[in-house]
Amino acid sequence: MDETTAATASAVVPDPDPSIRTHTLFEDAQAIFTGVLFVSLALILFAQVGLLTGGTAGAAFVLHYATGIGLGKLFFAINIPFYWFAWVRMGREFTLKTFVAISLLSALTEWSPQLFAIERLHPAYAAVLGGLLLGSGCLFLARHRASLGGATIVSLYLQQARGWRAGKVQMGIDCAIVLLALTVVEPSRVAYSVLAAVVMNLFIAVNHKPGRYAVL
C-alpha cells in the first residue's frame, strides 16, 4: 500500500454535507425497502433450487446448507463484526442504514417462504433472474448510502479509497466464496451460482461507477 492510499484508508469517510443532500428520508426508506425486497426474492429463488451467492449472504448459505440453521439468522449474525468497520470507514449514516437493511433482509428471508411458494424453477433461470435482482437491489442501497454488509462494505470502501470498481472487487470476493461451497453443494449448483454472481456483479460494474453519484 503506497503512502497516498494509506492516508486515504486511514481517514474516516464523512457523511454527506446536509446542504447538498439529494435524498429525503422517505426516498431513502422506499429505496432501502425496495432494494431489500429484491434481494430477499433472489435469495428465495436460490434457496428453492439449491444455489447460493457471494459475500456474507453466501457464507450464510454455506452454513445454512451445512447445519440447517435458518438463513436469516445466520446472515444477521455473520454481519455483526462488519458494523465497526463500516462506522469507522464509511460513516454513521451508512452504518445505520446498513444495519436497518440487514435486519430487514434477515426478517424477510425468514418470513417470505411462508407467503408464497414456487412450484417449478430451473436453476439457470433462477441464476440469471436472481443475479439481476441482487444487482438491482444492491445498487438501490448503494445509491442511498446503504449496503447488505460484509463484502459490499469492503468493496464500496475500496471504490472510495482507491477508485476500484465496486462490482469487480465484489466479483472476486463472491466467486471465491461460491467456490468454497463445493464442500457442501454439488458442482452443478455451484456452477449456476457462479453464473448468478457474474450476472450480479457485471450489472453493478456497468451501472455503478466512481464519481457518478455524489451521495456516495
Image (cartoon, rainbow, N blue to C red):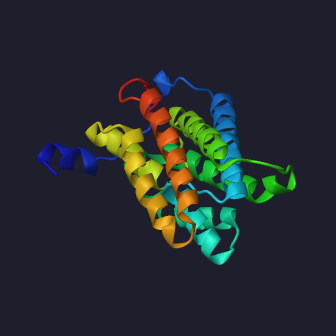
Q: Considering only vertical position in the picture, is 158 above or below 143?
A: below
Task: Give the quarter of the image for residue 125.
Answer: top right
Number of numbered discs present?
0
Q: Considering only vertical position in the picture, is 184 above or below 52?
A: below
* Residue drawn where x is 64% and y is 69% of the image: 64
Q: Is residue 43 visible?
A: yes
* Residue drawn where x is 61% and y is 62% of the image: 76
The quarter of the picture where the C terminus appears is top left
Q: Is residue 87 visible?
A: no
Of residues 115 and 153, the one nearer the viewer is 115
In percent of width and height, residue 59 lies at 53, 64
In percent of width and height, residue 96 lies at 56, 49
Q: Considering only vertical position in the picture, is 193 above or below 60?
A: above
**Which residue extends farthest bottom?**
67
Of residues 34 and 194, the one nearer the viewer is 194
In percent of width and height, residue 44 lies at 71, 52
* Residue drawn where x is 62% and y is 48% of the image: 101
**Which residue extends farthest front?**
188
On the picture, is 33 further left or further right than 175?
Answer: right
In percent of width and height, residue 146 lies at 54, 42
**Which residue extends farthest left?**
3
